Image (cartoon, helix red, strand yellow):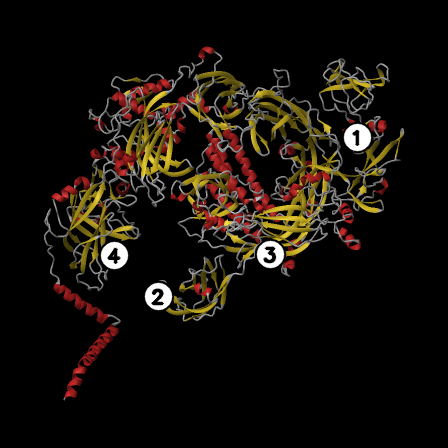
Amino acid sequence: MALSVLAVKGINLPLLEKSGSQSTLVMAHFQGYTLTSKVFDNSLNPAWNEEMLFPVGKMGVTSDDMVTIEVYTYRTDARGKLVGKCSTHASPLLVIPVITMELKLKDHFGMEQGATVICKLTYSKPPPLNRQVYVRQAKPIQQDALSVIKDTYQLRFTIHECRKLAHVPCDPVVVLTIGRSTRSTQIVENSCDPVYEESIPFVMYESPFEIAKMVVNLQILNTLRNDEASLVGEFKFVFMTAFLSDPIGWDEPAYSSTDTCRTMFKKWIMITHPSENPKNIKGFVSLSMSLLASGQELIAPPKIESLLLDVMANIMRPSEVYAQYQKLVIRIHRGEDITQMKDQFLVQESIMSNPRIQVEGEEKSKLAKLAYTNPYVTLSYGGSKGRTSLQYSEYNPVYMEDVIFNIEIPTICDTLMLTLMDRDIEFDGIDDPIGTFFLKLDKISYRSNDYLGFDPQFGPSYLNFYGRPREISENYTKFNYLNEGWVPGVAFRGRLFIEIFTKPSYSVGVFNELCDSPADSKSKVENFLNRKTFIMLFGFIEATMIEKGDLAIQFEVSIGDFGNSMSSTTQPTNSLTASSQPMFDGTKYYYCNWDDGRPVCLFPCQWEDCVYRLHTLNIMERILYRYEENLDRVQDLIQLEVDEKEVKAAMKRALKDLANDCLMTLPELPPVHTNLDEKLRQLRHFKLKNISDLATNKVQNIKGNWEFYEKMCELKINLNDAFTEPQTQIPDLLVWMISNGERIAYFKAPIHHFLFHKRTPGFACNKFRSIQLRYLGSKDDRTACLLKCFGWFGTEEEYWNYDIPSDGRVTVYAETFENQTVMGTTWSIKGLTRPEFSSPDGKIALPQTAFVPPKGWEWGEDWQISLDFSSLVTEDYNMNEYTDRIFEVDTREAGKSWASAKKVWMNSDMEEVNFSDEMPPGWESKSAWIIDANQPGDGESWQYAVEVDAAEYVSSSKPYHYCRRRLWLRERVKTGATVIPTVAEVVAKTGGWDYAKTFQSKFHSGEMNSDIVRRRRWRRMMNSRNVGPVCFEIWSDNRQVLVPPVMVLEFPEINTYEVRAHIYQGRELSSPEVDGTINAYCVVSCWRKTAITRTIKKHLSPTWDQSFMFKGITINGNTNDVRNSLPSVTITIWHNGANADVPVGVASLKPHPFFGENYQVSRMKWYPVYTNGKHHGDILAAFEIFQTIHGEDIPFVPPPHPSGTGLQVPPGIRPILKQTRIEVLSWGLRHLKFWSGKPIINPRLEIECGGAILVLPNIDDVLNNPNFPKTAHYFDVPLPQENNFKPPINIRLLDQRPNGFTPLVGKYVIKDFTPFDPDWIMAQLTQRKENMVDDKDSDKNSLISEEVEEKEDSIAETVVIIEDEIDYPSGCAACLSKKRVIGKSKAGQTPVTIVDETDDWEFLSMYWWSRYYAMQGNELLYKTFLHHELPVLVVYEKEIETYFNNFSDSIQQFKLQRCPKLGGNPDDEDDEKDPDIGMYKGSFRIYELHTDVSKNRELIYGTVPTVGPIKINVRVYLLQGLRLACRSRIKENTCDPFLAVKLGTREIFDVDGSLKKNNRDPMFATFYNLTTIIPNMPQLIVQTWDWNATEEGRDILIGETRIDLENRYLSVKRPMCGLTERYMIDGPHAWRDFMSPVQILEEWCLANGIPVPTYSSDGKRVGVNGEMFASEEFEKHAVNYEDTTVWGEYKERTALYVLLEFGLIRDYVEKRQLTDPVMPGVPQGRILMWVDIFPFSEKPPEPMRVDPPLPVEQELRVIVFEVMNVETIQEIDPGPGMEKLNDLLVQGHFSGDTESQVSEIHTRAVNGNGVFNWRFKFNFQYAYLKRQVMIPGDIEDTYLDPIVTLKVMDGDPGVSREPYGYVHLNLSYMPRGMVREDWAIMDIIPEYEEPPKGKDEVYDPDDYTFVGPPKISFLNLYKAKKTLGWWPLYKKDGDYLVKTGNIRMELEVMNKEQSEKRPAGFGRNEPNSNPVIPEPIRVKTEFKGLQAKLATLKFIWKSPNRCKFIIAIILQLVGFIFGALLWNAPSSLTASLAG
């Protein structure tokens, strides 16, 4: 449905343009949409005739809808002006669908202008909704039929996920409220699309009738914000409404109290903010709802992928939000290279023989011909599905169809799912997916309000589909799931040429439709189908780490269907390597020996020209890779703990490189490009520019630490967001490993990685790279093969100028295999199953005579026998040790004894061999021949079988056994190189034949008795000037076939290298064992070499300490090429399990090269170990590569390992070990949770480091006393000297269960030992406070601030003389600090004295709250405290423990990470939810030991006694609630809070003493004394409750905070009682700790191993740890400390200063956040509080007085006497020499008053001089501590500065509404009035700033004849009580204040009692007293008034409008006369008639 607005024409539009001509346009508004008409030029009666079509929401046109029409002028050089606007209701259209209206235009002020707009409105009503629904409808529910019987029900909500939340950044939590119950999900950090999958149950005892009426309130909160802005959005609905409105998803049967449960799955809810426009969607939430009665079970949700759900039809939205729709059009042009799904011959045979197919004869034969691919496309978007038509027997179908989705906007779903399907002709009802593609719409669109935003658009371009291999094979059917797309596909399956765009929708509802594309669609996209020829060259250098070597392998390279050697739809190309037999490396893996020539694949392919897109990707990836390299370099420097300057330099270089790289120009678009190309190019430039700016800004604030490094890593995320290119078109490159005709492993990479470009080629283009091939269908990272290779991809023109790296040369051969089989005892071609000369697989006959060189080629040599090197070597070729295995065989006849067989000695293949002691060349014997007694057998190790070739032998003899054998073993060691015969020798001896049992078996050199077939390879070289793609045309079996030649790569330079691998240690390796240990060994692979370390049993951080030298590594190319592409070293870590070895993880890295340069010892580094992309530990290792040069020795040969196995890591590389002592302070275990469904009641804690394990004693009763029975422990272990190389400390928690099962339940790993170094700790403890980070964050309150001293110095330097040394607030100090002269005399400068009289510190210092307000922004209080050196507070804006690392300085808290459970109930909700299993409290001290035992330090924890439970007194001060949350159900935006305190078993609910009604910021000002025992009950809980918050009178918890008292009591920082900054023995700030500062300092020194402090005789100096402290450093003004009755002795004061300098906790107050336990992480307000802790054995001091003074009722009396020289204005200029006459009055206003007071009017005041004698009275409440006025409120009180404002106004409002002048006076800090009027200058006003002088103004001292006041005083009126004098009047002129006159007045303030004793009336009313105000004496001005009237007549006569005035007077006279005539006419007429 739609609304049409036809703007017909405009009539008599007003002319607004000065040019005289005017062009106009119409802008129409409806339901949030705005449409604009065309421009009509140069007419005031425009005829637009423009129709504007508006889409209408789902609710249609409502009675509240308005149509607004605005007419604007149009200008090209400026913004148009509003001509007028008009509005009309759309409701009449509901009755009359077509209405024509004449609407009057109105201006800005709503005034009609006489202009008219004619428009026509047309409304098309919605058609009936015909939407396809894929889920059955629910039965209707009648609310009246619901039961009213109460029962127990459970409402279970499952929150699945959220999408598109509006807040960025966001840590969202979902909160559900039903009735009085509230629950929440967990918090997901840093996500706008969080996934929860959490169930939230609500259990209630209610009737179904009442449940149905309950309101569900769903809110999403952003926990990053602590105020009202934390609400992202909400949605409220009635529970029954969800039943009634939900069309789908509810499970049957209908709901009642006795039916089974009802469940709604995957409902999407649209959330909005209640205070914003409901059209601003804030996000979406997916949830399921279930209602279960007693005994009912929850129905399991259907297993449907989220992308297949009908999302768009499953939305619940607020009633105010109307659905708006848009059409998403997917135009499918054609398909290409669609894969065939079934073997056509098998399918045809199945159709012909299928009895279910009723058609016969010709029809059935036609049907059988359709047994090819029958493709069609299905599309799914948000659950709505569409499809194309079916194309039969087409590999390249043409569709030309549009699939249109009518989607609701904003949309939830961002993924369009396209699936290629194959229709099954066999009528089994199952169509097969060919391939699936998921297109992310956010990749082809951009949501933004600026010009960069665009709707989804794509193409026309190709989409590539991937799935399982294309070949039809039973072995691939198990990989069919790859075609469905849920797991990324592997092989190319086809592609679609599509186009996507959007257009407006005027239909309602979510649906889809299929229609034919427009006729011109094909011609529009023809230019996008032009193709270019590209060349792919891929060279193979090495293939290693092959796990299986039993069969020969080949490698295939393909792009799409090009290069697919098994495809029947493409021509054969040279994309398949020759067959190679893998060779064993002697240790674990196999490799391919390509020494005779590296295989090369070279083939052409044709693709669309999209190089500009791929080039853009390469540019952006180069930026990313370069930045990642720089980040890795920075990370290495930080890990190596180098100088911070070096780290900053590396960071600066990285950021500068990034900033410069991001400014790189992207490629220009070609003439033929898509709209998306243009949009993405603009967007990329925009994003890269932003990243460049961010990087540039970060350069200015570099910090060389981990935190800044993490900020740098955030830029990498921004870079990844910019790397999007959905229109690549060219498929990915695939490298396959093929064995026996089956694809077994693959490597897949985007083609742009290999794209050639002169400036920025792909990062893998023409470079040697190591790639990992993975097994097909493998779910882990197991390596099937490691390939060293290079690739090049470019156009055909670029190929001919291409150079192979390292000067490689391609040689081309023709290849054929000669085959024979054995016939009897001779070899012949008879009986062959393949041609005599054939291809390797035997499918094509290739006689040598059939090969003819292609055009441009010629033969280089004759046919030669080519040997396979792998068949020439034996099994022991690469082994250094080998065990010979020979079987001794006996036979017997029936009834006879055993005797030697004819073939006594046989190998494992039962081939006869010679038994001899002779060694092969290059070997020597390690042991003699012995019988293998480990084999199962009888007493003599014989095994028995029926015959020699039996598959199985047994260990006992039976009568029917006629053969037996036993195994002989001999070990030998290699002493020299293995001798390999030459090709000539082998050909002469064997003829070059290789033998095997079958052609599919492994071939070997040398004939055996069991061999049946043999073959040999023939090759013939070809020559050509340019080597390019080529094929032979050969006739085979009467058909012509194309046979690609063999291409090999040869390098002119080959160098030999040696790689050394130094493997030292592992850490945090994942363990599959129950106890968390690992039996680890490493497999190190490099090139063709492999080595295995020894196995370290039962270890957490295994130390192998082994080196391996891989010698004789031959690498092609020069050293520069090798340096740029170093061979990779792969380390695979294995766990040697009891049953089988399990892989732990893989680390891949590059060795450090030393090619001729001076050798420098390599540094070890931690390398990450990964499995399936997850981090599974680290390995400490170093790797080196040396070039082996003849005659030169490689330095630093590793020494032998002490164990005798292998080599040890050499000194210099291996970390230096030092004997290290680890002292353990074990305190206890806390908060142990369930593991595997059971509680942990018998824990065992182990601490391991470097192989040494300390087992702590068991805790006897972990529930009642969770502390360890012994506290201090230690163990010694050798550790590396470098901190970075040290193995971690592993804290392991095991649960000793009754059945002997002791699983590992929790662990914690400590990597950094620095915080436990005693020297480092001592340096931190004795560090002065100026350098302490903790105090800087929270300490605005330094004792004597350096900032204050600097300000005082700056003030003293000015011309102003300060009489009293005090620092003024910002307003005054800013004024005085300007170097300007206030007053000048002719004789010169006259200094002005400033006096401050506002200091009432004696009163202020009496209250604790004055200290608090001084630190909360009240600068006057703050300066007062600093000036008099009174103690101030530290105010922590968050919990105090967050500033001090949770007070873990003496006892650390280690959260033990939960280990995976091995059993238990998976439905336990309290299990596995929390990632922590518990907490270990303890600490460590780690230090090196001296070789001289006498020099070792004493045990640090040796004197720590074992401490039992400790009883303490706790005093909790609760001062004020801050912005408490409103939890009341009966009040809005307020609450009635009271306090509750819980500690141990004691609970205090203080309703009577702390209840504050209607207050969200309640002032509690109270304290509580409690007692507890730690560690049994260490947690203090402070709660705030809302009193009577429900209709039932129930209290609701607002929030709570929890405090760990144990940590505070044990902390070295001593937060148990904050230290006051001054030691005072009397007064409100008297010392309140139970210990004196001297005692505290002595105890602190002893606890930290510092010598006892020494004091001077007078106590003014103290020495601590070699440093001297003096009290003079801290007491700046001795005059403040003269009162000995207040201040303590010097010794105590000096000790206190030392404690403060060393960072002990000062006197503080903290603002703790309150949270609700059912909504963790959601702030509910804060509470101002602090806690004091005292030992129970000590008498606690008197509590501090924290009650604040209440506001005092005050009265301000202001008597205004007169004003002088007020600059006034007059409506009529009196003329020159005439005086100005004005009616003046004074208006008074005080802060908080709603109305102002006004004086009487001084009429006809001359020249702005008025006399009033008028009294103003203002009553208010004054808060002395805040120095502010309190305005009481219903919900909360408001505090304002006490400012009185006096304004001089004109008594005639018609003359001027603005004041002529005013003065603002802050009563707590105001300038004293001047005695003389001329002294009332603007400089006494604190806010005054002198305006700058103009260019022509020059300062001349002679111009300043006026002398200013001798003294400027600032006073506090509440202290002075009364003041009288002159003040300047002023007003604002621009940004500056300008003086406009003077005012003389008296100000007096008094309290209520004083005002009652001294009454006074308002104005001059009675009682006119205190003082008596006389009547004002004013100058008589009557004549001056007459003169003013005459001047008015004069003004009228001289006015240019005098004619109008004269005419008006004449008309008035005529009217008067005519009126008089009419008045007298009746009487005159009567008189005349009467006679």
**Among all residues in the image, which is located at the extreme top?**
1494
Q: Note whether 470 is above or below 918 in the view shown.
A: below
Q: Is there any visible trace of residue 90 in the rendered image?
A: no
Residue at numbered disc 2: 111
Residue at numbered disc 4: 1858
Image coordinates of residue 1355 in percent, x first then y, are 26, 38
**Count of numbered tags:** 4
First reached walking from the N terminus: tag 3 or tag 4: 3
Query: Could you tell me which secondary element the residue under label 3 belongs to?
Result: strand
Residue 1098's quadrant in the figure?
top right
Query: Could you tell me which secondary element the residue under label 4 belongs to?
Result: loop
Q: Nearer the viewer, mark 2 or mark 3?
A: 3
Q: Which mark is residue 355?
A: none
First reached walking from the N terminus: tag 2 or tag 4: 2
Marks 2/3: CA–CA distance: 50 Å
The residue sitting at 83% across, 33% down in the picture is 1015
Residue at numbered disc 3: 513
Q: Amino acid at mark 4?
A: Glu
